[in-house]
Structure formats: structure tokens, C-alpha cells
Image: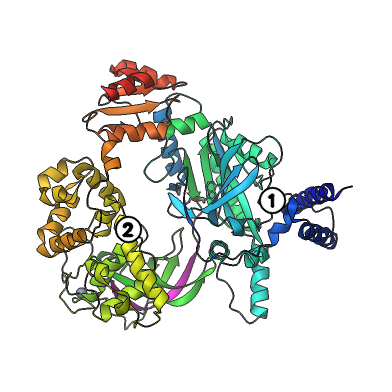
Amino acid sequence: MNIETKIITLRDELRQHNYNYYVLDKPTISDYEFDIKLKELQKLEEEHPEFHDPTSPTLRVGGTVTKNFETVKHEHRMYSLDNSYSKEDLEDWEKRIQRILGDVDVEFTCELKYDGASISLTYEDGKLVRAVTRGDGFQGDNVTTNIKTIKSVPLQLKGNYPPKFDIRGEIILTLEGFAQMNKDRVEAGEEAYMNPRNTASGSLKLQDSALVAQRPLECLLYSIVGNNLEITSQFEVLEKARAWGFKVPTVAKLCKTTEEVMQFVEYWDEKRHDLPYETDGVVIKVNNLRHQEELGYTAKAPRWAMAYKFKAEQVLTVLNEITYQVGRTGAITPVANLEPVLLAGTTVKRASLHNADQIEKLDIREGDTVFVEKGGEIIPKIIAVDFTKRQASSMPTRYIQNCPECETPLVRKEGEAQHFCPNDTGCPTQITGRIQHFISRKAMDIEGLGGETVELLFKEGLIANYADLYVLTKEQVMPLERMAEKSAENLVNGVAASKAIPFERVLFALGIRYVGETVAKKLAKAYKNIDALIAASEEELVAVDEIGGRIAESVVQFFGNSDNVEIVSRLKSYGLQFSLSEEQLENQSEKLKGQTFVVSGVFESIGRTELKKLIEDNGGKVASSISSKTSFLVAGANMGPSKKTKAETLGVPIISEQEFMSKLAE
Ligand code: AMP
Ligand code: ZN
């Protein structure tokens, strides 16, 4: 046998053993024999670098060190899931689906919801080329070097796979692996990790991939996205992925009715404690991919999938003290400081009490014994007080009257739950909070500058608002605690680089109350530049689609304050983007203003999402179901028959893709 053949044979053999062990859980040789073969291959590869293969099993041991993970845009967005908690919730969902799909049989695939860190893997020609974390759903971190060390992730696929696709899954730690890891750590004098989920997610961002290789991580897959995949159902997705060599749990079940779905849920609610990994619920998906396409997405989640959350665990503990936090908008949040207690794998010390009403409603007092619950969210909730344990000396809680940071008397507007500190220009927490929001990832995303440094800069009198960031010099920053020449330079460069951030994100960064990411996009699109927005009246703002009275009032109030206008004009003079770019403007028009479209079926020249964007960019509205308000139904191939009938009954004109395009070109 020549050397090359020998190397290739060894690689194939080791791949198969990895697969047997990590995917099938059925090893056929001992660890020792495996190690001997691996060492042999390592030696041959070292001697013959000309036969290098990026998918070799020897590369699983890691070794690459990554300082900063590159940000990568997801080709297909990674959505979140809507949650349900009862049979009624599920029935409502099914009704909504039937309303959109019309009178067709809908089947569901039920899977477990794995509790770990989501990951998107890209395969080209059967080879793993990229692994990206979910991030904010639009873009994540490139963690390929770390993912390659996870043995259940195939580097080279088997069988008949499409040339290019993304596959999504969850990186988890098994309970056994997690326990072993903690045992080792405690023995080595280190602190134990809190829970498998956070540890799995933290592992992905370790700089040294050799450390990742040592962790018993696994990757469980559940969805495939891409073009021309020739897959017709979710159940087939799971089967195909399994056949290509991925680890796909076999508990998934195809269900025909909500009853069957509920049986699956109830079964696993009971049996989940026997699983080798943690699950926090079930994910139910419409099985037929054509139905999925037709149902589409809300702003956050697919309409064709629903998570059913298992009931959270509860514990009793003592509320030691209620303290109050001030947010960047001046909103006051009461916080319950608890006697530390173990809950669903984490030690809980604090819980949010939301507002004064909540405190009154629960009649909660310092010294009370309370029920604490942890749902899916990170911050636990206080559900109720155990009144049988209340001390005779207990006194009703008196909500604070003054800001804990600046002593200013608090205000509470009609109809609002939250108390506010009105001293927005003088309250230190509000000032730094606004600057911290401004620099945050979804806003100006300023590299080299973090929340703590903002506080430091403020304390030292170097900045009093976010515009001041742009005149900071390296010499000013360097003397600060924990700063050095390099970090000072990074800070100044990071600030300068943010001048390229597009208008809609600058608008979001300004921190106008109620102007979140989505609203900022809407406003940027409608007004195109800041001067037009500053000049807009409340009436004009409300006339913009989806801008309500509350937002309009807040925008007018913000720009009615001359301090804010001055800061904006300073930012403008520093070169920040305060209007849409040429490119953004070019692709927009008002041609479809006042018209509502429903899009159905598959299109030839354009994807469904792009088509919808095209409609919106040209001033039109997209709706998910046909009503008398629909102006046109744009019909592609394989359109659902019920949509057609409904359009005909209501007299809604049906147009083809080509007709739509020529309408736009008019
Ligand atoms: P959430 O973060 O609560 O909105 O839930 C959405 C997340 O659930 C997704 O991003 C996935 O990472 C995760 N997930 C776990 N198991 C599944 C599954 N079987 N199907 C789809 N998503 C899942
Ligand atoms: Zn204050």
C-alpha cells in the first residue's frame, strides 16, 4: 500500500469509529486501539504534509487559538420560537394555522427542545466549512475551529447530500459529561460550573480549541435550510440528516392531531428526567415544508413551529431585602434580594419585582418566605408569598419616593406601572446607561469600549454624553485604570469606525424611549434623514405605518429638547450617518403605497422573503391572509387552493410574479 492510500484508509477507519462511538453510541473498538490508530495517522500526516485534509480526524484534538471570533452574517436568519404552555395554547395555534392554510390536513413533527446553545453549520460538497453561533439571529460568531473538535459533528458527510446547505442544531453537554467535568474541576481545586446549558454555551467561545476538545460536548441537529434541497417534510429533514452522519435524536414523532401532540408532550414531561441531557420542552413543527413556506414568519419566530414549555421548577426561599435599580430611561425596577437557593441547576440570589403594583399585588414584604420559579428566562420570578410563614412583626412594603442614585423625587405617569426618575440630564445612572446603550452591539457596536469604561470615563469627567466619545483622544484615555497604549488606541479607533454605522442603527442608538430596533428602521425608511424626522409632528408620525401615539409623542418630546438636538448636530459634524445611504434610497419607492399584498406559492426569479421585502421597500404592505382589504394576491407555483378560492370569492385580483414585476417597473 502506498503512503497516500494508507493515510486515506486510516482516516476513513477513524471516521467510522468516531461515528460509531459519538453518533450511534455503539463503539466497536476499545479507546486504546483507537488511540494507537490515531497516533499512527498523526505521525504519517506530519511526515507527509502534502496529503493534508481539513476533514482529518486528527484535527479533532484542536490547538488553534482564536483571540477574537469573526462576526458572520447568517445567510438564512436564525429565528426564535413562540412559546405555549397549555393544550388550549396549542389548539389556538392550530386554528391560526388552519385559517391561513385553509382546509388541508396538517401533520406535525414533535421533537424535544434541547437546552443548549444554538449553532448553524454550513456544509459545501459534504465538508464542514463554517460553524456560526446564533448571535442575534442575523449574525453570529464564527466558531468553526471549536466546533470541529466536537466528535459528533461530521467533518465529511456520507451518502447523498446536497452540494450546499446549512444545518441547525444545539450544542449541549450531557448530564453525565457535565457531572464528570465538575468532578474533575473540584478535584483540581477549581469552582464547579453552574449548569450544563451555560457551560456548553461558554465552551463555544473559549479561545483555545484544545480546551474545547476536552469537553464532552455534543451536537444535536434539527433543521436544514438551503435552496433546491429536494426535501418535502420536517420528518424527512431528520431522517436525511441522520443518514448523512449527523446526530439526530430518534425520539421525534410524526403526529396527526393535537391529541397525539399532547400525548407526546405529556409523555416527555414525565420521562424527561430519564434523558441523558436536559430538555425544557417540546418543539412542534408543521411537517409539510410547503405548508411551512406558506405560513412564513412573524418578526421573531416561524408561524409553523411552536415550543411547548414544561412547567418550571419552584422553590421556597426568604426575601432578605428589596432594593431599587435605575435604568437608562430613568425607569425604576425593584429587585428582590433572596437568600441564595438552588433552582433548576443554578443558585438564585435575585429576582425582579417589576414595579410597585406587582409588590402590592403580591403583598410582598422584606422577611417573607416566597415561591420562586424559573421559566425559560434567565431572571427568576417570584410567584407568591407563603403567608403561613409571615412574621407577626412584618410591615407592609413602602415604595421609595426618591431616586436611589440622585435623590430626585420620583414620578409616575397616569396609566403607567413604572416609577421614573425625571432627572434625565443629571442622574448619573441614566447618563451612563444611555451611553452604554449607544455603544452596545445592536446600536453603534463600538469595539474596544465596554460598559465599565463608560462609567470610568464619566466619573473622570471625560464624557457627559455620547457625543463626547467622538472627541476623546488617546492621551486622555491612557491614564485611566486598566488602560494601556494599545487599549486606548483600540478605543479611539473603535469610536472612529462607528461613524460608518447606518442611519437606522444610529437612530436606535440615540436611545429615544419606545424607539427599538424595528421602530428605528421604520422611521429611517419613512423619513430618510434626521432633519425630516426632527421636523415631524405627532400627527405626521402617527400617519406612518405601525407608529403609534406613544412612540410619536416620545419622538417629538426627544427632539423638542434642545440638548438632544444639539447632541445630534454635534454627532452629525463628526461624520455619523444621519440619512439613508444612496444604495438604500435607490432601491426604494412609494409605487405600491396604500396597497396590501398577500404572497403565496413558489416563485421562479425571486425568493418569497425577497419578494416581500421588495413590496415593503416600495411602500406596499404584506399581509399573511386574504381579506377584503387585500389589493392583490401574488400567486406562484403550487399555491394553496383555498387561497385561490378565497381571493376569487372576495374579488381580490390574482396576479403572477411577472405581472407583479411589470407593475413595479411601470
Ligand atoms: P427560544 O430561544 O426559547 O426562542 O427557543 C428557540 C431555540 O430553541 C432555537 O434557537 C433552538 O436553538 C432551540 N431548539 C432546541 N431544540 C430545538 C428543536 N428540536 N427544534 C428547533 N429549535 C430547537
Ligand atoms: Zn435619579
What amino acid is found at the position of numbered circle 1 in the picture?
A: Thr
**Residue 139 higher or lower than 258, as above or below:** below
Main SS type for the magenta part? Answer: strand
311 drawn magenta = yes
- Residue 372 image point, x, y percent: 43, 67
Q: Determine whether, in the image, residue 311 is placed left or right of residue 624.
A: right
300, 392: nearer the viewer: 300
Q: Pointer 1: what residue?
A: 55
The residue that appears at 81% across and 57% down in the rendered structure is: 44
347, 303: nearer the viewer: 303
Whole-angstrom CA distance, mark 2 to mark 1, is: 38 Å
How was this image coloured? rainbow
524, 581: nearer the viewer: 581
Quadrant containing the C terminus in the rendered view: top left
> Is ligand 1 within 8 Å of the beta carbon of the residue shown at mark 1?
no
72 drawn magenta = no
Q: Pointer 2: what residue?
A: 443
What amino acid is found at the position of numbered circle 2 in the picture?
A: Ala
The span shown in magenta is 310-327
Q: Secondary structure at mark 1?
A: loop
The residue that appears at 18% across and 51% down in the rendered structure is: 530
- Residue 452 image point, x, y percent: 36, 75
Residue 364 seen from this side: no
